Amino acid sequence: MITSILKYKFNKFFHSDRKVLVSLLGLVIALMVVIIIAGIAHFELGFDKHYNNSQNIYRIQNNRIYSKLEDRSAGCPPATAPSIKQEISGVSEATRIRPLFNCVLNITKNGIPNPFNETGIYYAESSFFKIFNQDFLLGNPTEALKEANTAVITESFAEKHFESKDVLGESFTCNSEEGEVKLRIVGIIKDVRPDSYFQFNCLISYPTLIEHNADAQYSWGWNAFNTFVLVEPTVSIGHIEQQLEELVTKYQLSRDEMKRVFTLQALTDIHLNSKLRHEIGVRGNLFSLKVLIAIALFILCVAWINYINISSAKSKKELMEAEMKAIFGNKKSLRFIESIFDSVLLNTIGLIVSIILLQVLSAELNQLFQISLPKISISKWFLLIACTYLIAIISGLIPAFYLERSFTFKRKAKANVNQRYLGVRNALVVFQFTVSSIFIITTLLVLQQIMFMDKKQEKLNLKNIATISSLNSSKDLQKAQSTFMQELSRIPEITFVSTSSSIPGGNYSNVIGGIRPIGVDLDKGIKCHFIDVSENYFKLYNIKLLAGRTFYSNTTNPSNSVIVNQKAALMLGYEKPSEIIDKEIVMEEFFGLKRTIIGVVEDFNHQTLDEPIQPLIYHYKKSGQYISIKHNAPLSADVTQKIKSIWNTYCPQQAFELQNNDQYYALKYAKHKKFSKLSSTFALLIILISSIGLYSLALFSISSRTKEIGIRKANGAKTHEIVSMLNKTFIRWVVLSFAIACPIAWYIMNQWLQSFAYRTQISWWIFFLAAGISIGIALLTVTWQSWKAAKKNPVVSLRYE
């Protein structure tokens, strides 16, 4: 019996009822989008929850409050962790982490050294594994990282550089800003899960750092260490933070010009909710995730509204069928069950087809959106399926309810279900196009913001600039770097060469507070960022000089001279750049050293447009961690080979990696462009599903007015008049939808744009363009059907009726 019912339903769905296919197409598209977004949401919301004590792990947030700004940082002094562990009750463990920058590893294979640049390398204490449990393949987690010159590596690191996982006891050399050290491998762990904030390939023992810099043992002046603590489950956060206040008071960590406040930041909140200086891990965007979840909900609602509208739009043949079933004893309860069964069966087919299509198209989707579709847990799949069937039952009940309320034999000839509940269906269509209009407007504004950022980046003039990471921790390395740069300057295609401690898109070298002009009160001190640069830096990056002079050379440039940007000059109290020239400033937080300002340059977006321009001080240094190369045309293969050859001659102990600066800077906007692509694609799908539903309803509505159209034609109505009459109703719905959508879309995009320090204006023309697109889509959807109905011979129309 069940087989016969299923055969009948499948025959009805796929052979005799086009409306069902329309509904199925919308459901398949919607469910694919929902599954994709559900996977993304499951991945993003699950960050760091896999650690055993994830709910009790916190990071210490170091807030330094000045008179004119607040420095919110994830970097703490190295003394923070041991002081908390020893002096604060309720904390069972504390650990320090510090990244290595510009790290060159050297592994000897068959007697030949192989240098290579590597990222994801950190100094870490042995207590790290007590807080962040890791799966050790080899080695002892209780003893790992206790001794100096030891390291723990991941299995992928071992396979990449040693071509084997069994490398316990093997050695490699690490050369960084702290100097060169030979490391012995004491542990191999499984790769860090992708849903972990802290991603690493290699951990170097913290005692190794102490041997190179004794301040790493215990100092309150080096704010560069991420500090994590494990809090006892029964202890309140308020109790811990109260003790942190006492710690600040005890060690006099606040000053006249700055107040320091330590707070706790939950590990599971960092990925989506943290935006601090000295972040070392993977961060997401909570607002973007909320938008994607809203897209999933709305696209599913639009698809189910299509089904409800189409199912409740009964033709005369379907009404006659329902009437005949009632005459032959089909009870009301059975009619409800049949409607629910149809809905559940259609949703089941849609869910199965969408899952199959996602499996088939997974590689293409990953390539298109640059995302890996994460796996969804069994419990989440169960929740997704349960929600699908729950709403399927509701969407099956609604058409049945409408039919039963209007289904009487006496009324059938005077009014059918379609006319009686036209208002309800119109309201649902208005909802669909309101959602579509919202996403049209928001998509246009997202694209406008992306274009705005691209134009801003073009103004930075980063094209034709390439950079190389370089070591400068010893005199020999500095000499090799200088010789390399001298040789590069002899290449005709290269116009400028300069060194710096940071490049556009990267982090600043340092941040120091309490900076003030001589004679100004301590509480007027400000916080400034620092970058070390050589003499050609400003010419290379086309940063204009506003007053004074730039650096000359090491022999003619006094060591105490600095250059500031316009933002720093203003915050120091000088509106005109010329007024600050030759003024002396004191850096209270840096041993009270004094510096003389010799020049002021224009503000430059060193970091991304997400961040406001910071007060910046440029300090002269002949060598740097980065070598920037300005070339007068795109680098050819011959010029690149010349640069590589010179590098291998003078810096053979370092790996050669040449990167385009504009591409490196653009990578900082990758998450925004990915969000733009995702939201734009899903918005188009919402519009497509809404258009499918409108097309189906237009087709049915026009067919139900066949007699009216025939009479009008017979009485002399022209084709364009009938087309206008039929389109007018649908356009009225679209205009109403757009009027509702405008304030909602404006609010959503205004909230999203707040995450950018530099953002486009919400222009009026965006709304006019969106209105034109909405009306255009509606006209394209219904006009063809209206035109065909209007062109039909009235004799045929009346005979049909």
Image: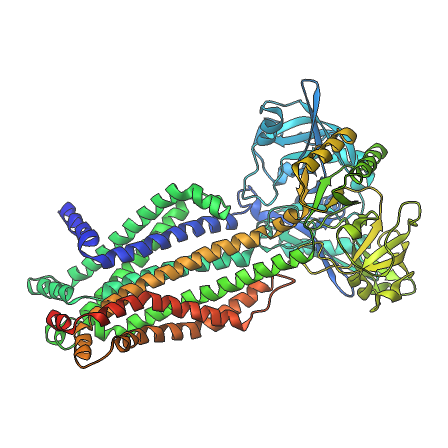
Q: Residue furthest bottom?
A: 715
Q: From what the image shows, is residue 223 above or below residue 413?
A: above
Residue 42, percent from left and from top: 47, 49
Does residue 201 appear anywhere in the picture? yes
- Taking depth in this image into account, of 44 and 716 the one nearest to the observer is 716
Q: Residue furthest top?
A: 110
790 to the left or right of 83: left
For the C terminus, which image quadrant?
Answer: bottom left
105 to the left or right of 670: right
- Taking depth in this image into account, of 273 and 37 the one nearest to the observer is 37
**Residue visible at 24% across and 63% down in the picture:** 311
- Taking depth in this image into account, of 586 and 379 the one nearest to the observer is 586
Does residue 101 appear anywhere in the picture? no
Residue 676, percent from left and from top: 52, 56
Q: Residue furthest front?
A: 492
Q: From what the image shows, is residue 726 above or below residue 446?
A: below
- Tell me how many marks there are: 0
178 to the left or right of 463: right
Residue 133, percent from left and from top: 58, 37
Q: Please tell me in which quadrant of the rendered image residue 110 appears.
A: top right
**Residue visible at 28% across and 61% down in the picture:** 307
Residue 509, percent from left and from top: 76, 48
Colour setting: rainbow
- Taking depth in this image into account, of 666 and 20 the one nearest to the observer is 666
Q: Please tell me in which quadrant of the rendered image residue 524 appears.
A: bottom right
Q: From what the image shows, is residue 657 above or below residue 456?
A: above
799 to the left or right of 173: left
